[in-house]
Amino acid sequence: MTTTSGDGLEAIEPWLAGVMERLKPGQRIRLARKIGQQLRRNNAERIARNVQPDGSAMEPRKPRDKASARRGKMFRKIGLARNMRIMAKPDSVELRFSPLVAGAAAVHHFGLVDKVEHAAGSPKYRYPARRLLGLPKGDRDMIMETVMEALDD
């Protein structure tokens, strides 16, 4: 699961591609990595607040018992840097989850069916879709500012 241009970046892609051609491949990779780090930070903060990329609140976890209430917030560790990987290339940047959390992230992001616990005989449940990765307007603005700063250097 990665952020893609389908999240609203396609409007600035032609302009961004033209600007990026002015930079050397090494400079483009550094710029892509910097943008990826900022996107990772922004997405991790948003996930910790249980807010989807469009600004709406994520559907709360279904209460099961007192033990589940003690567990705290959803997605406690999913936003850690070790669990959100950046793939920077001269012409793109991807933000994806590490293999350890990718399965659980996909279940919640797409609203899939999965076992409640990973034990034999555990019931299955269709989890509500909770968009984890995305590109809100604030992130698009941040990308534009970062590119403009890189051109000034």
Image: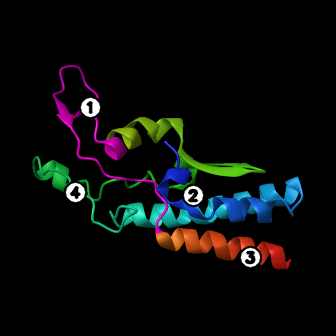
Secondary structure, mark 2, is helix
Q: Give residue 12's position: percent from left, percent from top.
A: 62, 64
Alpha carbon distance from label 3 to label 1:
44 Å
Secondary structure, mark 4, is loop
First in sequence: mark 4 or mark 2? 2
Q: Give residue 32's position: percent from left, percent from top.
A: 72, 58
* Circle 3 residues within 10 Å: few <14, some 14–19, many ≥20: few
Nearer to me, 30 or 14: 14
* Circle 1 residues within 10 Å: few <14, some 14–19, many ≥20: some
Nearer to me, 86 or 32: 32
First in sequence: mark 2 or mark 1? 2
What residue is shown with label 4? 59
Outermost residue toward the right in this view: 24
Residue 126 within the magenta-colored segment of the rendering:
yes
Q: On residue 10, which mark appears?
A: 2
Q: The C terminus lies in which quarter of the figure? A: bottom right
Alpha carbon distance from label 2 to label 1:
33 Å
What residue is shown with label 1? 114
The quadrant in which residue 114 appears is: top left
The amino acid pointed to by label 4 is Glu
Tag 3–tag 1 contact (CB < 8 Å): no
Q: In this view, does 72 lie above or below 49?
A: above
Tag 4–tag 2 contact (CB < 8 Å): no
* Circle 4 residues within 10 Å: few <14, some 14–19, many ≥20: few
Q: Give the range drawn in magenta.
A: 108-136
- Identify which residue is drawn at 36% across, 46% down: 109
First in sequence: mark 2 or mark 3? 2
What residue is shown with label 3? 148
